[in-house]
Amino acid sequence: MRKLLLLRPEPGLSASVERARAMGLDVIACPLFRVQPVEWVAPEPAAYDALVLTSANAIRHGGMGLTGLKTLPVHAVGEATAAAARDAGFHVESVGSTGVTDLLASLPASFKLLHLAGEDRIAPEAAQEVATLVVYRSAPIEMPGLPLLDDLVVAVHSARAGARLSDIADHRASTAIAAISRAAAEACGSGWERVEVADRPDDSRLLALAAMLCHTSPPA
C-alpha cells in the first residue's frame, strides 16, 4: 500500500490525518501553509440577503466580527463549512456539494450576498451582486520539509496548495494526485503519474479517492 501525503494547514490537517488513519492509511503530514486571521470590519447585515461561505476557515478565523452577521442565513460550500457555521451559531440554509459557482446558480439572481473569504481566492461566476470580505489568509511555510515524492499519493485540498506543490516538487513521475476539485488538479501541473478529482469537493470524498489510489499499484 502506498503512503498518503497530506498538505493542508491546521486545524483541517489533524482532522484529515485522523480520518485517513481510521481508514487504515499510512499518512505523512506536511502542511504547506499556516492559516492566519486578518483584520476586517463587519458591514451592516441589513445590506445583504445572505452569507456565502466557501471554507470553514472563515468561521475559524473570523473572530468577533462574525457576531453581528448571525442574522443572515448561510449558503455554504461543503458539509465541513456548513458544520463549522452551525457550531458557531449560524443558520445554514443550503449546502452546495459541487463548488461555489453551482451553489450561487441555485440562489435568486436578485440576492445581495456577502462572501467571507480567504486572501487567495478565485472569484466565482455569479448572477448576484457579491461583496467579498477577506477574513483570513494562508501564509506559506518557507521550508515545509516536503518528503521525497517517490511512490506516494498526495491529497490536494486547494488550487493554491496544488500550485505550491507544483513549484517545489522535483520527483513526481511515480506519485499520484488526488485533488479536491478540477481547479486544484489543474494547479498541480503536469508530469504526475496520474491526477484524479474527487466526485464532491469535501474531505471525506477526497480521502476516499486517495485511499483508492493508495491501494492501486503504479503502472509497470
Image (tube, grey):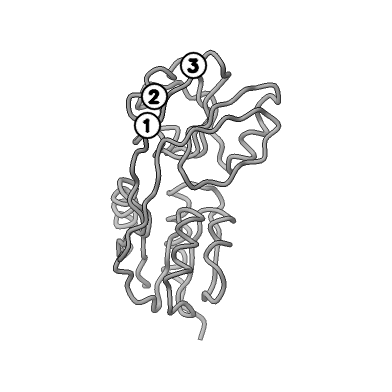
Corner quadrant of residue 114: top right
Find residue 141 and report its horizontal and vertical position in percent. Answer: 32, 59
Provide the residue designation for mark 2. Answer: 66
Which part of the image, by quadrant, shows the N terminus?
Answer: bottom left
Q: CA distance from mark 1 to mark 3?
A: 16 Å
What whole-number distance in Å separates the C-alpha atoms at marks 3 and 2?
11 Å
| Discs 3/2, front | 3
- Which of the 4 quarters of the picture holds residue 195? bottom right
Instruction: Single out the residue that lies furthest toward the bottom.
Output: 220
Q: Amino acid at mark 3?
A: Glu
Q: Position of residue 96 (x, y in %)?
A: 56, 36
**Measured along the vertical axis of the image, is residue 186 above or below residue 99?**
below
Label 2 Cα neighbours within 10 Å, binned few <14 / some 14-19 / many ≥20: some
Residue 149 appears left or right of 200: left
Give, as a three-letter code, the residue at label 2: Leu
Tell me the distance, in whole angstroms, between the alpha carbons under discs 2 and 1: 6 Å
- At x 61%, y 35%, the residue is 103
Q: Is residue 29 above or below residue 59?
A: below
Sequence-earlier tag: 1 or 3: 3
Q: Secondary structure at mark 3?
A: loop
Q: Secondary structure at mark 2?
A: helix
Q: Which residue is mark 3?
A: 44
Answer with left or right where residue 214 lies relative to residue 73.
left
Q: Amino acid at mark 1?
A: Gly
Which numbered tag is attached to residue 62?
Answer: 1
Q: Is residue 205 above or below residue 129?
A: below
Circles 2 and 1: CB atoms closer than 8 Å: yes
Q: Nearer the viewer, mark 1 or mark 3?
A: 3
- Residue at image location 57% in from the left, 30% down from the top: 131
